[in-house]
Amino acid sequence: ELGKTGTRITPEAMEALYRYDWPGNVRELENIIERAMVLSGSGELGVSDFSMLGTPMQSFFLPLDEIEETGLETALERMEKSLIEQALQKARGNKSEAARILGVKTGAFFYKLEKYGLT
């Protein structure tokens, strides 16, 4: 959706999002980005646009070169995979419980497991 709206995320903000320890579910990331887009009112989201997370996000930076090499889609996929791995760890490997933790349907969760090679 970012590409459709013409909104871009600065590399610094992307790094911060990647490093943030997402305590909620996968939808939390999507909601935070959507909220930042609405509140920003500009075509570019920076670190300050994600202040609603309540954590100084600059401590979560990735090396800028890594974001520039991979792009937004790959970085978001890495975050999603990381959240899934964390949920699986919290659920002690119980996939149905991990899906519940993330707030996603079991079928969608199993699709993501296969997509990221976590089966």
Image (cartoon, grey):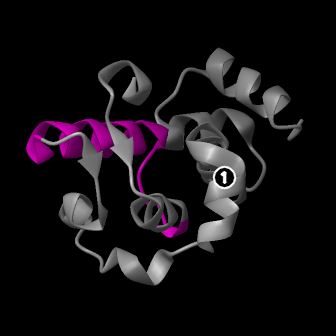
Quarter the N terminus occupies: top left
- Number of other residues with Cα within 10 Å of mark 1, as a class: few under 14, some 14 to 19, many 20 or more: some
Q: How many marks?
A: 1
Which quadrant holds residue 92?
Answer: bottom right
In the rendered image, residue 6, in percent from the top left (x then y), is placed at: 33, 28
**Mark 1 residue element:** loop
Q: Is 86 situated left or right of 10 in this image?
A: right
Quarter the C terminus occupies: top right
In the rendered image, residue 86, in percent from the top left (x then y), is placed at: 65, 58
In the image shown, does 8 or 74 lie closer to the viewer?
8
Residue 90 showing in the rendered view: no
In the image shown, does 62 or 29 lie closer to the viewer?
62
The type of residue carrying mark 1 is Ala
Span shown in magenta = 19-41
Q: Which residue is mark 1?
A: 91
The residue located at (20%, 66%) in the rendering is: 51
Position of residue 99 relative to residue 1, above or below, is below
Q: Is 48 situated left or right of 28 in this image?
A: left
In the rendered image, residue 100, in percent from the top left (x then y), is placed at: 53, 35
